[in-house]
Image (tube, grey):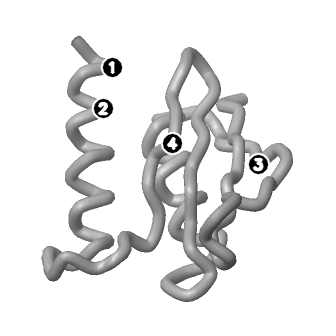
Amino acid sequence: MKTMIGTIALGLLVSACAGGRGAVPAAEIQSMSGDQIGVVYYDGVSGMGGATKIAQEYCDKRKAMAGGKTDGGMAPDKTVVNFTCK
């Protein structure tokens, strides 16, 4: 139940970041599993701050520690960051 509420809250946070205008969101969840979350951010819209904010919400009271960053592939300004809740 707590996970479902957290997922809904994260979805609302991501929607708020997009501004409701059909724009590219500042950051969005790519994957979630246990104490791991992958977040995508777009350099042209925001930086690492948006991704960190989403990861910290997912980790709740634990600290979100950023792991490796990877290029998002086709989009030149897309970056994927993997976080671990500690």
Q: Position of residue 63 (x, y in %)?
A: 66, 40
Q: CA distance from mark 3 to mark 4?
A: 14 Å
Q: CA distance from mark 4 to mark 1?
A: 16 Å
Callout 1 touching callout 3 (CB < 8 Å): no
Q: Which mark is residue 66?
A: 3
> Mark 4 or mark 1: which comes first in sequence?
1
Apparent side of residue 81 relative to residue 21 in the rendered image (left or right): right
> Mark 3 or mark 4: which comes first in sequence?
4
Callout 2 touching callout 3 (CB < 8 Å): no
* Residue with the mark numbered 1: 3
Task: Decide: is 4 above or below 81.
Answer: above
Q: Quadrant of residue 38?
A: top right
What amino acid is found at the position of numbered circle 2 in the picture?
Gly
- Determine whether the residue tagged by mark 2 lies in a helix, strand or loop: helix
Tell us which disc is closer to us: 4 or 1.
4
Apparent side of residue 57 relative to residue 49 in the rendered image (left or right): left
Q: Position of residue 73 (x, y in %)?
A: 70, 59
The outermost residue toward the right is 68
Callout 2 touching callout 1 (CB < 8 Å): yes
What amino acid is found at the position of numbered circle 3 in the picture?
Ala
- Determine whether the residue tagged by mark 3 lies in a helix, strand or loop: strand
Q: CA distance from mark 2 to mark 3?
A: 19 Å
* Residue with the mark numbered 2: 6
Q: Position of residue 84 (x, y in %)?
A: 71, 33
- Determine whether the residue tagged by mark 1 lies in a helix, strand or loop: helix
Tell us which disc is closer to us: 3 or 4.
4
Tell us which disc is closer to us: 2 or 4.
4
- Determine whether the residue tagged by mark 4 lies in a helix, strand or loop: strand
